[in-house]
Image (spheres, coloured by chain):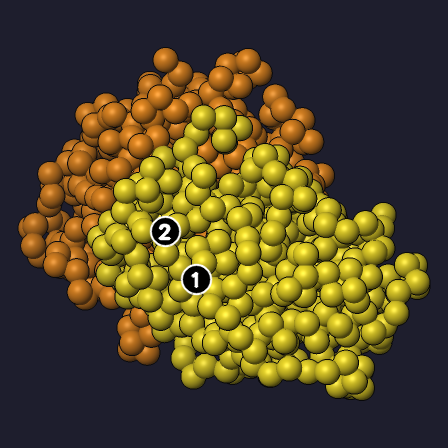
Chain colours: A yellow, B orange
Amino acid sequence: MYGDGGERVAVVAAAMTAFGERDAWIRDLLAEAGDDCLSAAPLSPPAIDHLYVSNMASGEFEGQTGTMNALAHDLGVTPAYAARIDGTSASGGSGLHAAWQSVASGASDATLLVGGERMTHRSTAEATDVIASLTHPVEYKHGITLPAFAGLTARLYLDRFDAPREALARVAVKNHANGTDNPHAQFRREVDLETVMESPTVADPLRLYDFCPITDGSAALLLCPESRAREVADSYSVIAGVGGATDTHVVHERPAPTTMGAVRDSAATAYERADRSPDDVDVVELHDMFTILEVLQSEDLGFFEKGRGWAAVEAGRTDRDGELPVNTSGGLKSKGHPLGASGVAQVYEIHRQLTDTAGARQVDAEVGLACNVGGFGNCATTTIMEVPQ
Amino acid sequence: MYGDGGERVAVVAAAMTAFGERDAWIRDLLAEAGDDCLSAAPLSPPAIDHLYVSNMASGEFEGQTGTMNALAHDLGVTPAYAARIDGTSASGGSGLHAAWQSVASGASDATLLVGGERMTHRSTAEATDVIASLTHPVEYKHGITLPAFAGLTARLYLDRFDAPREALARVAVKNHANGTDNPHAQFRREVDLETVMESPTVADPLRLYDFCPITDGSAALLLCPESRAREVADSYSVIAGVGGATDTHVVHERPAPTTMGAVRDSAATAYERADRSPDDVDVVELHDMFTILEVLQSEDLGFFEKGRGWAAVEAGRTDRDGELPVNTSGGLKSKGHPLGASGVAQVYEIHRQLTDTAGARQVDAEVGLACNVGGFGNCATTTIMEVPQ
C-alpha cells in the first residue's frame, strides 16, 4: 500500500474562478483557473509533467470534446501528458485521485489538475436531463432524476429517524451564511429558515432552497512530491489519503437507502491511508447537492451517529464556529456546483484552510476532509489533507 | 521516477469482444470484455480494487453516461473505485496509463481496465462529426475532420519524401492480411493493392481503403504488481514503461506536419522508463486510423528514418514475417476502431504475443510496443511491454 515508505503528495498552489453564470465556454473556464494556479505556483509552466481535466459532459453540454489536449495548448504546457477524468458529479474527486496517483507512482513530478463545467447556457431541465443520463435506463425511463431520488430519500430519513424538516433547511441556512464570505460563490447572500421552508416544492419534502444551483466554473490544483514542495514552496498542504468507491448502480437495490455506501467505503480507504480517524478531522467539505446529502455524509463519514446528523446541524455543531465546521466555502448549495469543478473546489477550500489563507472563512484546522459524490451516491471519493508535519 | 526501485506492473489477463457491428449498447459491450477478462484471471472479482473505463463519447453516441459505475455493478466488483478515462481516440492508452499508475502508486493491488465504444448505430457522418468535436472550433467550422487532415498530411508526405502512393496502400494490404488470422477482427478478408488504389476517394490522395472503419467493441486487461503476478499467474507480461504526451491542439501550428510530436515525445518517456531503445522492440501495434499514420508513427517511434517508413513497408520489413512486424492484429484498419477500446486492444495483442498465445498471428517477441493516438496527433500514449525477466 502507498504510504508504507512511499513519498507523500503535496498541493503547492490552488485557484478557482468565480462560480455562477459565466459568459465563457469550457475551454476559457478551464484556462482561467489553470492560468491562475500556474501564476501562483512556485514552478513554471514547462515543469508540468501531467495535466488532468475533471469534466463530466462538455460534449453533451457544448458539443466540445478533447478539452484536456486543448487546455495543454492554451496553458503552454505541451508536451505534458493530458487526460480527462470523469466520475460524473464526482469528476473533481476522481481527477484528484488520478493526479495523486500520478505523483505517488513517480510518473509525474508536477501535475496540474483543472476541473470545470459549463452548464448555465442550458435550461435547468436540459442540464438535469444530461445529469440523469448517468442513471440506470430503467430508472431514467420512469422519470427518476437525481432531485427525485433526493426527495424520496429525505422523506425516508425524516420518517425513520424522527427528524424535523427544519433540520434540513438549517443546512441551507448555514451554507448560505458561509458563502457570504466566499468571493467565488454563486450566491453571496444569507437566507433565513422561513425562506427555505416556504420556497416552492421541487421533490417533496424538498424545496427549491434544498437544492444547489446550475453553475459554470472551474478550479485548479498543482500537485508535486512533498520533498519538492519543501524545497520550492513557502507553504503547502499534504494529501494524507485518498479513497474512492462505488455503490449499487440501481439505487433501489441498496439495503439501506439512508446510508451512502460509497461514501462510507471511500472514507474507510482514505482514513486507512492517512492513518487518521474521524476524530482527527477539523474541517470538512461535503457534497451538499441536496441538503439531505450533507446530513447523510456527515454520518457515513463517521462524524455523527447514523440518524443523528440532523441534530448536529440543528445544534450548530457544524457551523463555522462549531466543533466541526462543514462547508466553510458555502458548499455546493451557495458556492454552486459546476460538476467537474466541485470536487476540485472542495480541496481548494481545504487547502486554503490548512495554509491559513481562507480569509474571512478561516477556522483553526490541521486536518481536513473533502467528500465528492457522483450520481446519487453511485460513486464517491474522500480526500484527507493535513498540514505538513 | 518510477522504476528506480519501485515495483513493476504486470498484465495477468486480457480479453476482447468481437469487433464490428454489434447489436449491443455500451454497457453490454464493456461487461462482455470485462467478464471474459475476470473469468480468465487468476484473481476473483471481489479482489478488484480499481476499475477504469476507457471511453470517449458514450454520452454523445448513446445518451448514456456513468458507464464506469454501472460496469462496477454489472461485473460485481463494487465497492471498487471506478473512473472513466478519456483521451479521445487514445482513450485506451490513457486508461492504460491510469491503470498502470494505480498499481505503481500502490493505490491498487488489482486494477481492471475496460475500454469500449459503440458507434455503428450512428451514420458515418454522425460518428465523424462526434469525433471532430475534439478539434479546435475554428478548424471545425471550416469543415476540417480527421480524414481531411489525413488527406492533407498524406499529400505533403508523398511530395516531401518522394514516396509512391502505392506504399500507403501496402499498409492496408498488410494489415488486412494480418487481420484474416484475428478472430476478433471486423474485416477478416484480404484486399489487394488494386482494390485499395481504385477504391473511392475520401480525402485526396487517400481512398476508402486507407481508412479504418466505424466499429463497436470492447477490450479488457487485468493489472497487478509483478510480485503478485509471480504468485498467482501461470504466465503474464510486464509493462516496462508508459509515456503520454500532447502536441499543438491546432494542427497547422506544428513546425513539421509530417512529424507526430506527441508520438515522439510519449515514446521518449516510455523508452526511458523501460530502459529500452527502438532496437530492442520485436513487435509493434500502431494507430493506423489512416494508412499514412502507421508510416508516420513508425518513423517518430524511431524504427525508421524520417521519410523512409514508406520504404520499410514496401520492402516487407513490417510484414508479419519481416524484421519488425507491425499490427499483427490487423491494426485499426482491419480489426476496427471502437475509439475507447482500440488502445486497450493494442496492448491485448502485445500481451498475447509476449505470452505466446497469439495463435496463428504468433511471432517471436520478447519486447513489444503499442502506440495509441488521439485526434490528429493531439495526444498519444506509448506502452512498452516485455516478457518477465
Residue linked to disc 1: A357
Q: Residue at x 73, y 75 (%)?
A: A210
| A289 lies above or below B384 | below
- Label 1 resides on the chain identified as A
Q: Nearer the viewer, residue A71 or B308?
A: A71
Q: Amino acid at mark 1?
A: Thr
When asked about the image quadrant of residue B335, the answer is top left
Q: Position of residue B63 (x, y in %)?
A: 60, 66
At mark 2, the secondary structure is loop
Instruction: Name the foreground residue: B160 vs B251.
Output: B251
Q: Is residue A208 left or right of residue A255?
A: left
Residue, disc 2: A235
Residue A352 image offset from top left, x and y in percent: 46, 59
- For residue B15, which quarter of the picture? top right
Q: Is residue A374 left or right of residue A70?
A: right
**Dot 1: what SS?**
loop
- Disc 2/disc 1 C-alpha distance (Å): 10 Å
Q: At 6% across and 50% down in the image, what residue appears?
A: B162
From the viewer's perspective, tell me whether residue A210 is left or right of residue A369: right
Task: Check the residue under mark 2 and report the chain it is in.
Answer: A
Assess whether mark 1 and mark 2 are in contact (beta carbons under 8 angstroms).
yes
In this rendering, the answer to whether A68 lies above or below B136 is: above
Q: Are marks 2 and 1 on the same chain?
A: yes
x and y percent of residue A68 in the render?
Answer: 38, 59
For the point 53% across and 28% down, which residue is it? Answer: A1
Which is more N-terminal, label 1 or label 2? 2
Q: Is residue B135 visible?
A: no
10 Å crowding of disc 2: few (<14), some (14-19), many (20+): some
Image quadrant holding the C terminus of chain A, namely top left
